[in-house]
Image (tube, helix red, strand yellow):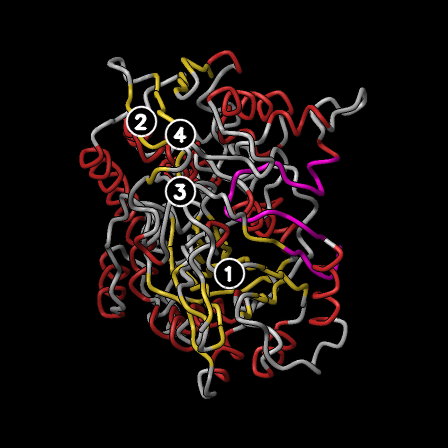
Amino acid sequence: MRKLAFVCVLLFGAMGVLAGVPTDVLVIGIKHAAIIDFEPARVYEIEGSFVLEQLYDTLVDFEGGGVEAFQRVSPGLAESWEVSADGYTWIFHLRRGARFHSGREVKADAVVFSLRRALELDKPPIWILKQFVNSPDDIKALDDYTVSITMNQKIGEMLMGAVLGFQGICSIVDPEEVKAHATADDPWATQWLGEHDAGSGPYKLVEWVRNDRIVLEAFADYWGGVPRIKRVVLKDIPEPANQMLLLLKGDIDVAWNLLPDQIAELKRKKGVKFVSTPTFIFYYAAMNMGMEPFNHEEVRDAIRYAINYDAIINGILRGEAVPCHTFEPVGLFGHLDLLYPYDPKVAKALLDHAGFVDKNGDGWRDYPDGRPLEIELWVRNDPPYTDIAVQIQQDLAKVGLKLKITQMVYSQLLKFYRAQKAPMVLVRWGIDYVDPNSNAIPFAHCRTAGPEAEFKQLAWRNKFCPSGVSDLVEKAVGILDPVERAEAYKTIQRIVWDIGPYIIIAQPKFTVALRANVQGLEVPPIWSFTELMHVSKE
C-alpha cells in the first residue's frame, strides 16, 4: 500500500509535468461527485456501480459493449442455470474455484448470505429484487455449489438476468469479511464496506481519497484470468474541459465525461480515438390525453410527423445520438425498430381531416369549433431541452400549429407532471434495469387514469389507459420462451407507437475519448456495466 501511494504521488502530485502513464497503469478522468460510498446494498448511482463492476461478481452477467451487450445473459459466478418445471424457481450451478479477494472460495452459502443481506438492509435499490423475491427464505443453498431462488411469479431469462445481474444489491460479498468487521451498532458492516471491498471481482479496492482518486489493483487469482492492466486509477476531474486537456497531454488515458463540442474538437486531433454507444436514455415529449387538443389521435399523430428528428440529432445534438421512436431503446432485448418519418404533408392532411384548420385567416390552425388553438409545451430549463423545444416550435409552425414554450426548473416540472397537470412536456427517461419490463410498466401499464390507480407512472400521468394493453404487459413478464417474449414486447410497442401520447425523439450516445494506445475498451449502453479487465495499453 505504501508503494502504491508513492506511485500515485508521482503520477498526480504534479499533474501536467508527467506526460504519459506507464503501460500497466490505466488512468481514467471521471467525475466522482455522485459517489457516496461503496456499500453494495446501497449503491445506486451509475458512477458507484461502475466501480463495483470491477470489484464484485454477480450470479449472472452481461458482456461486451455497444448495442449487443444486453441481448443475452452470460455466466458470472454461476456457470449454468435452469428454471423449474413450474417456472417459478431458478437454480444456479456455481463455478468451482472462484475466490474472494481474501482467498476464500465462493460457495453457495456466500450467495445466499449476500442476497439475504441486501434484502434485510432494505436500501432504496432493493425494489429491483424485492418485486420478484418476497422473502430472504426464498433464497436457498441446495449444496456447496447450487443455489435456488424462488420468484413470486414466472419471469423470463432476460428479466432474471437483469435483476440478478444488477450490480450492487446482487453483488456477492465475502461473508467472513462482513462478519469480521461487524459491530453491535453495525451488524452488517455497512460502514466498513462503504470504504473497502469484500468481492471476488477482477480488481481490488486499494485506495480511495475522496475528491481525488480511486485506485484499483488487479486480482491475480481472478477466475476469469488476470486483468491485463495491473492498476486502474479513477482520477476525479469534474470539468470535462480539463479531462480533454489532460488527455491531449497524455496525463490520463481515458476521458469519460466529454461534451459534444469537446468530442467534435478531439476528432480533429491525432493520437485520440473514441468508443461510442447509444445509451438506454432517451429524450421524449409526452402529451396529456386528458387535455385538448391531445385527446384527438389525429393531432398527436400530426405532431409526430411534423417534427424534424434529423435536425435535432445532427444539429442540436451534434450527431451524438441515434433515432429511436419506441419506448424500448435501441440495443435492448425486444426493441421494435419503428420510426416516424419527417413528413409535414402528412401532418397537414391529418389536421385538415380532423377539422383543425385556420378559420380566422391569421395563419394558425383553430379548433373545429373556431376557438384559437395554442399548444403549450413545458420544458426543463437547461440544454439541450430548451434547444429541442425551439426546434419543435419551428417545425409545428410549418404545419400551422402555434406552440408556446414554458421553461421550468426540472423539480417544479416533475411536480406538475406527476400530478397529471402538465399539458405537454419535454424531458428524458432512463431505464432502471436491462429488461423490456422496466420500460413497459411505466410507458404502457395503466388500468385507470383516476386517483385510485395502482401504477401512477408515465402512462397514468398522460391519462393513457388503452384497453387490454396492461394485460399484455403483465403477461409478457412471465413468458419463458425468449422469442415469444420479445414478440410480446414488440406488440406492446407497436400499439403505443400508434395511439400513445409519447414522442420519443432520440437516444443520446455515450462517447469516451481515449489515447490511441489503449486497446480493448468496450462500453455498453448502461456504462456502469463497463468491464476494465480486458483493457490493455500498447
Q: Amino acid at mark 4?
A: Arg
Instruction: Name the spot of residue 199 as percent of width and height, x first.
Output: 57, 38
Q: Of callouts 2 and 4, which one flags the residue occurring earlier in the amino acid sequence?
A: 2
- State how far apart marks 4 and 1 are (Cα): 25 Å
Distance of label 2 from label 4 (alpha carbons): 14 Å
Which labelled disc corresponds to residue 229? 1
Residue positioned 24% across, 59% down in the render: 350
What residue is disc 3 on?
434
Task: Using a 10 Å C-alpha cutoff, classify the residue at mark 1 as few (fewer than 14 neighbours), some (14 to 19) or many (20 or more).
Answer: some
> What residue do we see at 50% from left, 47% from top?
202
- The residue that mark 4 highlights is 96
Amino acid type, callout 3: Val
Looking at the image, is mark 2 or mark 4 nearer the viewer? 4
Residue 135: % across, % down: 52, 14
In front of the other: 413 or 158: 158
Q: Which segment is the magenta one?
A: 192-215
